[in-house]
Image (spheres, rainbow, N blue to C red):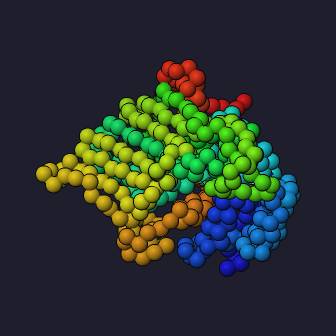
Amino acid sequence: MMSKPRIGVGVVGFGWMGQAHSRSVRRLAGIFPGEPYYIELVACSDTDPGRREQAVSDFGFARGEADWHSLAEDPDIDVVFITTPNALHVELVEAFAAADKHVFCEKPVGGTPDQTARAELAARKAGVISAVGYNYRWAPMVQEAKRLIDDGALGSITNYRGRFFSTYGADPSGLLTWRYLVDEGGYGVSSDLLSHSVDLGLYLLGPITRVVGTTATFIPERPLPSAGAVSHYGHGRPGDPTGAVTNEDYVGMLVEFDNGVRGSFESSRTMVGPESQMAFEVYGTEGALAWNLERMNELQLYLRSDGRYAGYRTIFGGERFPYHGNFVPGNANGIGFEDLVLIEDLELMRSIAAKRPFQPGFEDAVRYVSVQDALLRSAASGAWETVKTVRSQ
Ligand SMILES: NC(=O)c1ccc[n+]([C@@H]2O[C@H](COP(=O)([O-])OP(=O)(O)OC[C@H]3O[C@@H](n4cnc5c(N)ncnc54)[C@H](O)[C@@H]3O)[C@@H](O)[C@H]2O)c1
């Protein structure tokens, strides 16, 4: 085994996604055996001492660090997973790319379009592999949807509807974590959730040329968290001191794709009802399809050629589709959220081992924030706005 090339991993930010990626790279070889590399967990940085300890004692990192700078100087680290709050992303990407490390950064890469463009420039100039955590692209049923669209099974596509409704902020007692603060998270739900939804639209149908949209903040104050690392699923108590939410809870927009498709996107973190409804619908002249993260192992397909029996059918995920059979055999035995993270990390490791670019990379991150930039301009102007690629000089 040791004759295989080694890929040394560093992680900065050991919360939800830092832990999810660490678990994924740890179990990768057991699920996809025979890969032409082996992975070592070299160092994990988090400002929270308990999380650093956990990284070493439970996850097997060789060391934990309070200050991430030492990871940039470590020759044993080849790739760094940046899984901190968004506003820290760009500084980390710039430092690690300059130190010749490959960089995986969680979406949306930075908290503002300008920060994303800076990160893209830093990675491009350094010539390192960049990767962005748009993990829903890797869902086998999403990939099947793309194959159906590309193969023309739906005819010519005319309409698209994308949405990401999460209930994590629906309760006003939900804590004022970094996601609600422009200085720490950057923009609100347009950075956090809409980014995933629009990325899938861009992946499935190509560029968006113009948008008209609106934003709103429905819960303007939230309880302050106590000191230490807390989850955005955490809650305060009645009477706790509160602070102001400084970014948006909701976004909605109409869009035009370059290929003529008309579409709409909506995203909310405060809606009551949908728990994690990251969903899309595609309509063409010969058929339609629909996918929803809440039922991620199912694809709904309608084909006009079915004639009098036309109607939506449910296609279950399973070993007949790529990746799925490595997790569980047969069909309709489901895979889960973290399995998508594992597939994403598998493909990143393959790119690093083969020294080839990874998609989605920071160029794809820029594609989304260019749409976000037009949406924010439109919310201010009230008019249709053209999508212009956001670049850093
Ligand atoms: N792809 C997905 O499905 C998905 C899901 C959730 C979050 N995310 C993204 O992942 C990133 C992290 O989100 P999360 O939910 O894991 O956040 P989190 O709040 O759970 O974890 C963030 C961690 O970063 C640590 N941290 C803060 N400042 C630090 C510093 N200076 N140095 C080292 N560590 C520091 C915190 O202590 C915490 O442990 C965000 O960019 C978010 O948009 C992606």
Identify the residue at the far front of this view.
239
> For this rendering, which residue is in front, 184 or 232?
232
> For this rendering, which residue is in front, 19 or 62?
19
Q: Is residue 41 above or below residue 164?
A: below
Residue 218 picture location, percent across and down: 57, 37
Residue 319 picture location, percent across and down: 40, 71
Identify the residue at the far left of this view.
308
Q: Is residue 42 above or below residue 99?
A: below
The image shows a total of numbered marks equal to 0
For the question of whether residue 303 can be seen, the reply is yes
Measuring 36% from the left and 57% from the top, which residue is drawn there? Answer: 299
Identify the residue at the far bottom of this view.
1
- Please state the quadrant of the image where ligand 1 appears: bottom right
Q: Quadrant of residue 49?
A: bottom right
Q: Quadrant of the C terminus?
A: top right
Residue 266 picture location, percent across and down: 48, 39
Measuring 26% from the left and 54% from the top, which residue is drawn there? Answer: 312
Q: Quadrant of the N terminus?
A: bottom right
Measuring 46% from the left and 38% from the top, which residue is drawn there? Answer: 265
Residue 346 picture location, percent across and down: 58, 64
Measuring 41% from the left and 47% from the top, which residue is drawn there? Answer: 280
For the question of whether residue 186 can be seen, the reply is no
Q: Quadrant of residue 185?
A: top right
> For this rendering, which residue is in front, 157 or 236?
236
Left or right for 316, reference 5:
left
Left or right for 101, reference 213:
right
